[in-house]
């Protein structure tokens, strides 16, 4: 049966109306932009469920618009990841010159303004997408974020972006001038050859600033002066210049400002007075800078913030000057996975990054009050709480899993950082927040692979094709395909110091503390000029296979 002219006309009209509405939604949707992002909400403001969640704010420079059907996402391969609900116009309608905030907490059950993804404090890109799930209307890329400091347009809808010490959710973007805070120059080290190194492994001069307040202080607008050279901190990398509440921050006087905002363009080879000014230009503290101070000693306050100063034979960089050393228990970082696809699910059924801690001793170890971090400049980044004592105890030869997912709401063993798949350092510290229990530089890892000790608590570290979370490491788990190259034995063994060791592959030799003491690029004789003791060789085959490590005894 043929359609009537009226049916055909109605169909055409409906098609035209549909196309018009689609065009209109896209047209007006272009007036809506991402305006502000808070990707590390530690305790700035909370949602209706009293939870501190990350959020994205949108701004509408056009007419009133219901965002039902539009999308937000942090995944370029899934542009329709989260859709504004179709049945809640009270929460999805944005007024002219208005704002709307979406909580990024991966908990849609809490309301129409809660998205099904979280933001990463390590940085990512977020997208505002048209109703077609294809057209990107706006996007913003951000890097590492500092707790409770937002990243937003300098004014509503503006193209220039900046950091805000005081976020402005659902309000006009504007910088709020903060009063200067009480801070102290707490410790200085003009001559540093082995105490502490910067991100480039350089041992440079440094100054430690102590924040005695119960809130963090961003050094933006503050300045340090030495012998006529002045540096005023800019708010371009707040994660490098913000001092945590009751905490410490190191700034390098190395005249290498291009290495980051925590490096000052100040030469430190002459004695003088080091002066700190607040963001109002008024001096808030000063200290003596003695360029002739004994090598690897420091000059600091006897007590943090106290008026009396003393010489430290053992400097306390990034820690209290009155620290009481607490030796760690028999625990090590045993295995790490930074790109967990389907290897191991946490208590919430999610496949997050993880860190395995192993107790190699004969007694239980309680890691409550220990610290773990992925930032050398934030040694106390995550504090393992003491309120769940039973679950923080690791039995002898036992394991404990920490999930690096920035989601503390899922339990005490969920850290406030993720592990970068491109590699980064992980450090475990004792309850004094200073003494290192163990540390490892995790390299870039492929999807589903992990970085672990070849045997529990032993060296070397290798890449596991089959990770062993919460279980023993080692070849007994069929992790490796051992090649015929394992038949070669370096010789002579034992070897006297001063002699040459014959090897057939590139490798590195480690002492009992895990420090590399020798490296070589290929086969041939390797000079051995080492103290007597037992050493381990980690071989580099270059073929994707793993050769069993070799033990070498060095004698007099």
Image (cartoon, rainbow, N blue to C red):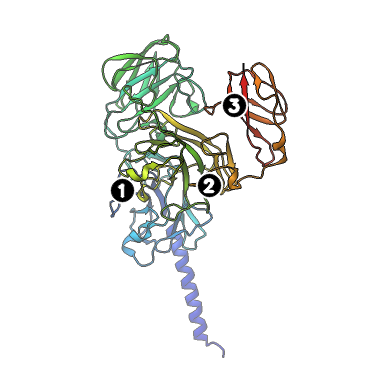
Q: Is residue 279 above or below residue 392?
A: above
Relative to 520, 104 lies left or right:
left
Label located before the other in sequence (1 or 3):
1
Q: In the rendered image, which quarter is residue 530 located in?
A: top right
Looking at the picture, tell me which residue is in the foreground, 371 or 163. Answer: 371
Q: Position of residue 188 (x, y in %)?
A: 38, 18
At x 41% / y 41%, what residue is drawn?
Answer: 395
Mark 3 residue crowding within 10 angstroms, few (<14) / some (14–19) / many (20+) = some
Per the image, the residue denoted by label 2 is 468
Per the image, the residue denoted by label 1 is 171
Q: Position of residue 46 (x, y in %)?
A: 29, 49
At x 39% / y 45%, what residue is drawn?
Answer: 413
Alpha carbon of mark 1 to alpha carbon of mark 3: how far? 62 Å
Using the rendered image of the protein, determine whether residue 376 is visible from the camera's viewpoint. Answer: no
Closer to the camera: disc 2 or disc 3? 3
Closer to the camera: disc 1 or disc 3? 3
Per the image, the residue denoted by label 3 is 535
Looking at the picture, tell me which residue is in the foreground, 181 or 95. Answer: 181
Looking at the picture, tell me which residue is in the foreground, 117 or 363. Answer: 363
Label located before the other in sequence (2 or 3):
2
């Amino acid at each position: 049966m043929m359609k009537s002219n009226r049916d055909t006309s109605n169909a055409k009209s409906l098609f035209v109306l549909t196309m018009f509405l689609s065009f209109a939604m896209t047209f007006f949707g272009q007036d809506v932009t991402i305006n502000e992002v808070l990707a590390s909400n530690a305790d700035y403001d909370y949602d209706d469920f009293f939870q501190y969640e990350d959020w994205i704010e949108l701004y509408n420079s056009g007419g009133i618009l219901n965002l039902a059907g539009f999308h937000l996402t942090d995944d370029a391969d899934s542009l329709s990841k989260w859709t504004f609900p179709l049945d809640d116009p009270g929460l999805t309608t944005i007024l002219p010159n208005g704002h709307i905030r979406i909580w990024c907490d991966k908990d849609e059950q809490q309301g129409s303004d809660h998205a099904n993804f979280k933001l990463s404090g390590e940085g990512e890109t977020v997208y505002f997408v048209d109703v077609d799930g294809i057209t990107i209307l706006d996007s913003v890329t951000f890097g590492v974020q500092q707790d409770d400091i937002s990243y937003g347009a300098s004014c509503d809808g503006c193209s220039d972006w900046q950091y805000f010490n005081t976020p402005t959710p659902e309000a006009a973007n504007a910088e709020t001038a903060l009063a200067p805070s009480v801070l102290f120059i707490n410790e200085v080290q003009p001559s540093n050859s082995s105490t502490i190194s910067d991100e480039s492994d350089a041992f440079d001069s440094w100054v430690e600033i102590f924040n005695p307040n119960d809130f963090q202080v961003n050094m933006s607008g503050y300045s340090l002066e030495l012998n006529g050279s002045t540096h005023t901190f800019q708010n371009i990398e707040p994660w490098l210049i913000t001092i945590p509440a009751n905490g410490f921050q190191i700034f390098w006087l190395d005249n290498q400002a291009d290495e980051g905002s925590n490096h000052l363009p100040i030469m430190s080879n002459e004695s003088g007075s080091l002066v700190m000014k607040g963001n109002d230009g008024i001096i808030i503290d000063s200290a003596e800078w003695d360029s002739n101070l004994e090598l690897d000693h420091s000059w600091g306050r006897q007590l943090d913030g106290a008026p009396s100063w003393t010489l430290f034979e053992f400097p306390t960089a990034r820690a209290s000057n009155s620290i009481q050393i607490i030796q760690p228990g028999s625990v090590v970082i045993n295995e790490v996975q930074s790109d967990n696809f389907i290897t191991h699910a946490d208590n919430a059924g999610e496949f997050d990054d993880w860190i395995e801690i192993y107790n190699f001793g004969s007694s239980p170890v309680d890691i409550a009050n220990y610290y773990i971090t992925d930032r050398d400049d934030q040694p106390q980044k995550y504090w393992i709480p003491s309120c769940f004592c039973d679950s923080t105890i690791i039995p002898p030869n036992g394991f404990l899993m920490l999930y690096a997912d920035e989601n503390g709401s899922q339990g005490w063993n969920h850290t406030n950082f993720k592990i970068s798949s491109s590699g980064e350092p992980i450090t475990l510290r004792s309850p004094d927040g200073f003494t290192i229990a163990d540390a490892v530089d995790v390299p870039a890892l492929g999807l589903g692979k992990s970085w672990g000790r070849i045997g529990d608590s032993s060296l070397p570290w290798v890449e596991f094709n089959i990770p062993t979370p919460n279980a023993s490491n080692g070849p007994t788990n069929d992790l490796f395909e051992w090649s015929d190259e394992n038949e070669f034995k370096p010789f002579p063994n034992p070897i006297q110091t001063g002699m040459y060791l014959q090897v057939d592959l590139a490798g590195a030799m480690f002492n009992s503390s895990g420090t590399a003491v020798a490296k070589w690029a290929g086969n041939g004789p390797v000079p051995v000029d080492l103290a007597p003791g037992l050493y381990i060789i980690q071989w580099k085959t270059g073929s994707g296979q793993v050769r069993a490590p070799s033990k070498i005894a060095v004698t007099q």
